[in-house]
Image (cartoon, helix red, strand yellow):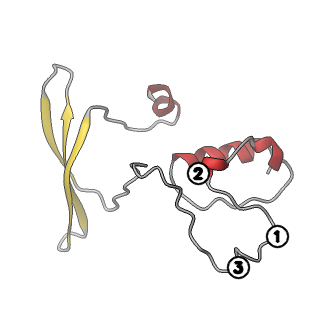
Amino acid sequence: LEMYTKVMELNYWSSTECMGASFDEATKEWVVKVVRGVNNGGREEVTLRPKQLILATGMSGVPNVPDLPGMHTFKGEIHHSSKHGDSVAYADKKAVVVGSNNSAHDICAALWENDA
């Protein structure tokens, strides 16, 4: 994980727990309270005020495949990221990835690297 965040130039706080989040209508911002571990072994409470809040916990473990209009008559392949294999099989093919989590990003990168 540390290498992934370094390569992707992501800010990442390990040992961090989200204590709660609420949307502030007046400022049009989320108020997110987290408690994070600090280098001396202590903990500090931090309040973040992002414009967007994305919950990408992956806790359910159950693939979420939306029922999109036309998907039942589509003649191509449809699968959840949990069933995605080697992107080499998609070389020179057209592909659409619906999603915005790490899996979607990784699959898009692999498809691009394989000329899909």
Circle 1: residue type: Lys
Question: On the rendered structure, is 91 left or right of 16?
Answer: right
Describe residue 89's horizontal placement relative to residue 46 as left or right.
Answer: right
Of the numbered discs in the image, which one, if any, rests on residue 70? 3
Q: CA distance from mark 1 to mark 3?
A: 10 Å
Residue at 21% over, 21% down? 39
Q: Check if mark 1's residue and mark 2's residue have beta carbons within 8 Å.
A: no
- Name the residue at 43% across, 38% down: 10
Residue 36, placed above or below residue 94: above
Residue under label 2, please give it: 104
Q: Residue furthest right?
A: 92
In this view of the protein, which residue sits in the foreground, 2 or 79? 79
The residues bearing labels 2 and 3 have C-alpha atoms spaced at a distance of 21 Å
Q: Nearer the viewer, mark 1 or mark 2?
A: 1
Left or right side of 18 for 102:
right
The answer to whether the residues at label 1 and label 3 have Cβ atoms under 8 Å apart is no
Q: Position of residue 11 (x, y in %)?
A: 38, 38
Name the element at disc 1. Answer: loop
- Check the image and name the residue furthest to the front: 62
Q: Please name whichever residue, 60 or 36, is drawn nearer the observer in this view of the structure.
A: 60
Looking at the image, the residue that sits furthest to the bottom is 69
- The residue drawn where x is 82% and y is 70% is 75
Q: Earlier in the sequence, mark 2 or mark 3?
A: 3
Q: Earlier in the sequence, mark 1 or mark 2?
A: 1
| Residue wearing tag 1 | 75
Identify residue type, mark 3: Gly
